[in-house]
Amino acid sequence: MRTLIKTLFLFLIVGIVSTCAQTVPGPCNNVSYGAGVTCISGAGASSGGNGPGGSNVAVSSWTVNYSPHCSGIACSTHALILTAYFCYDGTTCSANNGLINMTVSTTGSYGTHNPEPCFVKSPHSPFILSGFVPPTGPIQTVEQAMWVCESAPSGMTSVSVNLPSASAFVLAPSVTEWTGLATSGNPWDVDAGYVGGTLVTQLTATTPATNYSNELIYTYQDNTGDEVMTPIAPCTQALQWWRGNMNNAYLAPNAGTAVSCSAKWSGTDGWYATIGAIKTAQSELKTIAPPSGLTTTVQ
């Protein structure tokens, strides 16, 4: 028995050291995605004990400290993509209390904007993502949402995701900054949410058929074991601020097809993800050509 206990103890220690030794890649750094779209940088934070910056207690708000790389009129062409999720309980993330409205505020040299009007939710945000499994424990549920702000507030120093009451555990917002996105006031095309119901080593999230060319396909995804993710081509990482919390992106040149983003990791985990198609400055609506060669018959 002592030998078995010693063996299990050493196995546990090795596993912990291996997990902690995983290197978390940083944010994008002026990475071109094509069609004039560039990922400038990004940041994330979590209120939960499984991420940096807080303890696992119920909160009503959590903040990411981030300043756009622009000032004045130049910020009109710098967009922000914001994502966030939270659990309804702080022990197993297994509770499901239904949709809770999330709002966004910012602070900066201008004071506080609450709410911040520039952020537009994806068409079906927020999603309740329920039914994914952790390596151990009960089935889990999170609420997750995505927003786009087409013109970053000049002088912004932080962005917060807020709830009506202290009802969120592991509230985890993240933000990335982009140039080359649309400034039409209606940034989103289509979106979808997914969960992995079995323990696997990779995930795939797929949009509905898109309606515009040259769209930025954007995925916010997480695995339950906090394993560092590796994007699978053609999608590439925009931000992974904590192990497994990855923002994945791809510039889809053609309209009219469903587009997938995938990622992989070393262990076997459950997972969840949201994915959306965001219009860029070069996006064009897919048009259907009228049929040709038809004749008119008069009866």
Image (cartoon, helix red, strand yellow):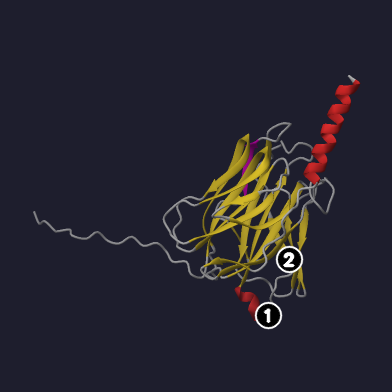
- Near-viewer residue (282 or 4): 4
List the residue tagged with mark 1: 72
Q: Judge from the rendering whether residue 57 lies leftward or rightward of residue 258; answer left or right.
A: right
The Cα atoms of the two marked residues, 2 and 1, are separated by 16 Å
Looking at the image, which residue sits at the far bottom?
Answer: 73
Q: Residue at x 55, y 54 (%)?
A: 276
Name the front one of labels 2 and 1: 1
Q: Specify the principal SS of the magenta part.
A: strand
Q: Amino acid at mark 2?
A: Thr
* Residue 106 marker: 2
* Residue 131 on the magenta span: yes
Q: Residue at x 46, y 56 (%)?
A: 210
Can see residue 112? no
Q: Judge from the rendering whether residue 207 lies leftward or rightward of residue 164; answer left or right.
A: left
Q: Amino acid at mark 1?
A: Gly
The N terminus lies in quadrant: top right
Looking at the image, which residue sits at the far left?
Answer: 299
Residue 41, percent from left and from top: 68, 65
Secondary structure under the numbered disc 1 in the rendered image = helix
* Residue 143 on the magenta span: no
Residue 191, percent from left and from top: 53, 52
Looking at the image, which residue sits at the far right?
Answer: 2
**What span is in magenta?**
126-132
Can see residue 72? yes
- Near-viewer residue (61 or 224): 224
Secondary structure under the numbered disc 2 in the rendered image = strand
Lower sequence index among marks 2 and 1: 1
- Where residue 211 sits, quadrant-wise, is bottom left
Residue 282, percent from left and from top: 48, 69
Position of residue 198 relative to residue 176, above or below, is: above
